Image: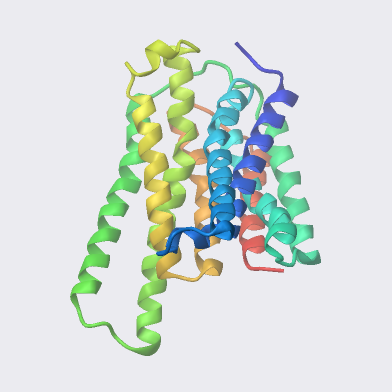
Amino acid sequence: MGLPLPLAAAAALGGNALLSLGMVLQKRNVAWLGAARPLDRGSRRAALGWFSGFMLVNAAPAFNYLALLGLPPNVVSAAAGSNVAFTALFAAPLLGERLGPRRAAFSALLFGAIALAGLRGGEAGGGAFSPAALYAFIALPAAAAALAWALLRARRGRAAPAGAAERKGDRALALLFAAVAGSCGGYMVLPMRALQLAAGGEVARWLATPYPYLFLAGGIGGFVHVQVAYREGEMASVAPLYYGLQVLWPALASYFVFSSPFDPLQASAFLAIAAAIALISRGS
């Protein structure tokens, strides 16, 4: 079953808007998680807000599933870059953060580049599918994750250096964790498309394939590693690499996994998306 391109694009952007709103709601109400005492009325309200955000975040993959019925995986993945712009838009009224003309301009650039990538992307189609390439593009982030955790354990086993040396080491480690998280998060769209090709809409057949488990591995890997990245480094350093690889890793992988080539104009759109993400993440 196919989906018309406009509806598929709307599903991709709508899902990312819900995801961003959910993340902002969780950020707004996160304080209740550390409450040691019984929850008062304000804390209960914060808990409800946090869980509302949690539900929105978990509803987003269903929209990506629909989007993949009308758009190729590299375009659906590129649309994930809109999270940065949506987050900035929602953070202004809900978190009191300033949007600013600079972020507004780069957000417009981001949405324009996503539209260009979608228009040049064609339809999802059946296409060739390489399971070996699908496994390779999760194995590489897994290997990087093993290195990151080994370095983190080694650093904790030593006496912490002081001053600038410590901050530099933390930043490098944060960037490695951010790269793993972004690659894992962007990877999720690939097994989702593989699931459609292997089992179609037959839910009973999904669990008989390895693809739901690869999807979960990508999601868990992205969630866990970005938490460590946020703890080890500044948001301004972590966010561009995290969000950029969410776009670029699956765009590269789609070429090998699904034989989804892209012409120079579409490649330029992907690079513009990554650049806009970095510029938005640097602030207003």
Q: Nearer the viewer, residue 67 or 259?
A: 67
Counting from the top left corner in percent of width and height, residue 196 is at: 48, 18
Q: Nearer the viewer, residue 196 or 208?
A: 208
Q: Image height check: is 14 above or below 230?
A: above
Counting from the top left corner in percent of width and height, residue 26 is at: 56, 53
Q: Residue 80 falls in which quadrant of the image?
A: top right
Q: Quadrant of the N terminus?
A: top right
Q: Residue 15 falls in which quadrant of the image?
A: top right
Q: Is residue 264 visible?
A: no
Q: Residue at x 47, y 27 (%)?
A: 192
Toward the bottom, the furthest residue is 163
Question: Horizontal placement of 258 versus 22: left or right?
Answer: left
Q: Residue at x 38, y 54 (%)?
A: 225
Q: Residue at x 62, y 63 (%)?
A: 281
Counting from the top left corner in percent of width and height, residue 153 is at: 22, 66
Question: Horizontal placement of 247 versus 165: left or right?
Answer: right
Q: Is residue 34 visible?
A: yes
Counting from the top left corner in percent of width and height, residue 10 is at: 72, 31
Q: How many marks?
A: 0
Q: Image height check: is 253 above or below 107?
A: above
Q: How is the image coloured?
A: rainbow
Q: Residue at x 50, y 59 (%)?
A: 32
Toward the left, the furthest residue is 157
Q: Image height check: is 248 above or below 207?
A: below
Question: Horizontal placement of 261 versus 163: left or right?
Answer: right
Q: Quadrant of the C terminus?
A: bottom right
